[in-house]
Amino acid sequence: MHRRIIRAWAAGLLALPCLLVPSHALEPPASAAAALQAKHIELQPQLRDNIFGEPLHLSSREGQSRVEGDVYAEMAYPIDAVAATFKSAARLCELLFLHLNVRRCEPESAGNRETLVLSVGPKRARVSGQVYDITYALRIESAEASYFRATLSAAEGPLSTRDYRIVFEAMPISGSHTFIHLGYAYSYGTMAKLAMNLYLSTAGRAKIGFTVVGKQPDGKPLYVRGERGSLERNVMRYYLALLAYNSINAGSPQEKMAGRLRKWFALTERYPAQLHELDLNEYLEEKQADLARATTGHR
């Protein structure tokens, strides 16, 4: 039982949105906007020819006590629609909730300060005591028509995890399309490393990411595994949540949530080798139970 709880904790940990603020995030908005524009030009070959079949580029890196990476993509939505999602902790919670490991997200505000409390746990909420919370502070750093940037930050997480950073950048590339960047990373200590190693040697040992690191003997692609693979799977899930959220805007709040849940699941099923975990009915049942618990105030 103890090992199962640790594995579930590690699986949830790897699902946390932990996006790195890139080096140009501290630059003035004009400089940061120019850097994003230059990146869009630089990545044209990767955006046009990749394993995703869409204008999307994902990369990841692993250090001694840190994993990090970047997602760049062209989205078929105008910048004002895409950026609106990141201007409100409440809307961000609706987006993040689509991820199968996010059990609850509560927006909070005090004056001009907005935060959100993210509760993350295993994909099946059958065992109590496995959900943990992290409080993120939301900051809008630039909200121009030509460039948008928002950041989320949390100094500490469960056990020995720390320095959670999220950045979202966007710029228009036409009247109806937007180039976006998600930077992501987190640091971890000994306890988190042990838990992740246990998960990756048991339940997560056969799971793969998206980066091709070589070829198998039969010539098929060899995909990254381990912590980088886990990070890539989950950042892809959050990117697909952004797509699903922006794809459905009509109906009541309940109808929009139901439509976005189904859309998110359909998008993840485009990459079954990396992202398939539950069937549609299981996923919807878990999410409906999460929503019911949130309504009644139960965990």
Image (cartoon, rainbow, N blue to C red):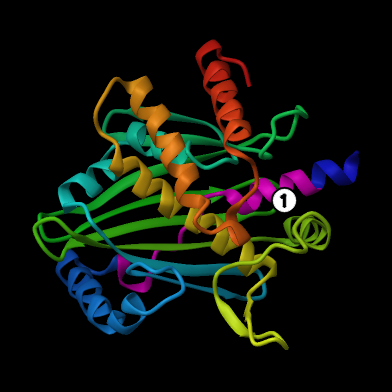
Q: Is residue 132 visible?
A: yes
Quarter of the image where one finds residue 9: top right
Tell me if residue 267 comes above or below residue 257 in the rendering.
Answer: below
Quarter of the image where one finds residue 200: bottom right
- Residue in the picture at 63% in, 32% down: 282
Quarter of the image where one finds residue 251: top left
Q: Position of residue 212 (x, y in %)?
A: 57, 79
Q: Position of residue 281 (x, y in %)?
A: 59, 31
Tell me if residue 108 comes above or below residue 155 in the rendering.
Answer: above
- Residue in the picture at 60% in, 60% down: 274
Which residue appears farthest toward the right when viewing the image?
1
Residue 243 included in the magenta stretch of the image: no
- Report the span colored magenta: 7-25
Q: Secondary structure at mark 1?
A: helix
Q: Position of residue 100 (x, y in %)?
A: 57, 40
Residue 15 included in the magenta stretch of the image: yes
The amino acid pointed to by label 1 is: Ala
Pick whichever, 105 or 123, lies toward us. 123
Tell me if residue 173 comes above or below residue 62 in the rendering.
Answer: above
Q: Magenta region, mostly helix, strand or loop?
A: helix
- Left or right of 297 in this view: 44: left
Would you name the residue on which mark 1 appears? Answer: 10
